[in-house]
Image (spheres, helix red, strand yellow):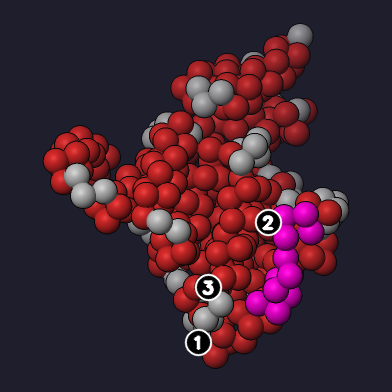
Amino acid sequence: ERALFARLNLAAGKHSIAASSYEQARGYFEAGISLLHVNAWNKQYSLCLELYEMSVVVSFMDGKVETVSSRLDIILSNAKSFDDAVNSRALRAKFLASQAQYAEAINEMLEILSTLGEEFPKDACLSHVTSEIKATQLMLKDITKKKILDLPTIKDARKLNTMKCMGLLITLGNYSSPMLVPLLCCRMMKLTFEFGRCEDTISGLAFVSHALLHYSDDIQLASRIGRIAESLISGNFHEHSLRARLTQMTCSVKVLVEPFQATADYCLTGYNSAKIVGDVDNTMLCGMMYCIAYFFSIPDLIGLQRYMFNFFPQMAKHKR
């Protein structure tokens, strides 16, 4: 009976996450953990693993640093296999990055990917990046949204984990290892066409769009791929989370081919999505990009000043 209620709390917590009620979700997961058997890691392994992982996810979103660290230690000391530990190791990398330990976070993810069969250099050179971009440019030259949607979904669990890990690493690398980013997004496209699409295919497309802008002269292809990524985000189950993370990438191309007003509106949409899912970093980033686009699109300096007076105190608060 306790196990049944633990499962019900797990399900309720997932529904709360879908509704962006993270504090409520954390309460459900904690209640579920309290209902587990005293020897749960042996007698209720799968249920225990999922409850602890979900507890880490919402605690991270809610800023409960101590809970994140302690729960990750428990999971990693009890996980029975590499595959069972992948999600938690990825969460640990994300946690390390949140503590400004970017090198450690990237090394953690590169080690995971190596075990999954995907090797990447720690210090990528420009010639390697350029070569990969050219190959991907050729592969995607006739790409459309329909061609992406016509691909089968990934069935191989390991390849799905690989895509998820690269989706996380590409975000971490964007801030501390930028030469790694184009290699990751090109590999994500290669895996997509070889094994099928998944949600992280959208991240790969958005970052490829950004990479083409910087490492090729094909702005039109970069723009088309960026628009495909945008259209795949709309209506996705994790629409707000994806838009929060990817607005910066697609916006970098949009600003070159569309009016500044359209870019400003797009940044504001990203800002609102980031607020909905509690993504503080991207809330601030999208807000800053909105200020810049607004400045160039509308000669209303009083309106811009009013917005910035409201926005900068938010940035100061979250920095603290």
Nearest the viewer among 153 and 74 is 153
Residue 56: image location, x then y, percent: 53, 36
Identify the residue position indicated by label 2 in the image: 201
Classify residue 49 by image quadrant.
Answer: top right
Number of other residues with Cα within 10 Å of mark 3, as a class: few under 14, some 14 to 19, many 20 or more: some
Viewport quadrant of the N terminus: top right
Residue 46: image location, x then y, percent: 75, 33
Marks 2,1: beta carbons within 8 A: no
User: Measuring 50% from the left and 87% from the top, which residue is drawn there?
Assistant: 126
Classify residue 132 by image quadrant.
Answer: bottom right
Residue 306: image location, x then y, percent: 17, 37
Separation (CA) of disc 2 from disc 1: 24 Å
Vertical placement of 126 versus 98: above or below?
A: below
Separation (CA) of disc 2 from disc 3: 20 Å
Instruction: Indicate which disc, 2 or 3, sits on the residue closer to the N terminus.
Output: 2
User: Measuring 40% from the left and 44% from the top, which residue is drawn there?
Assistant: 265
Q: Residue furthest top?
A: 1
- On the question of residue 178 being in view, the answer is yes
Q: Was residue 77 drawn as part of the magenta stretch in this picture? A: no
Q: Secondary structure at mark 1?
A: helix
Q: Which mark is residue 219?
A: 3
Q: Was residue 142 drawn as part of the magenta stretch in this picture? A: yes
Separation (CA) of disc 3 from disc 1: 19 Å
**Residue range corresponding to the magenta coloring:** 137-147
User: Measuring 37% from the left and 49% from the top, which residue is drawn there?
Assistant: 261
- On the question of residue 56 being in view, the answer is no
Q: Secondary structure at mark 2?
A: helix
Residue 13: image location, x then y, percent: 60, 22
Amino acid type, label 1: Leu
Would residue 312 appear left or right of 150 to someone viewing this image? left
Amino acid type, label 3: Ile
Q: Which mark is residue 126?
A: 1
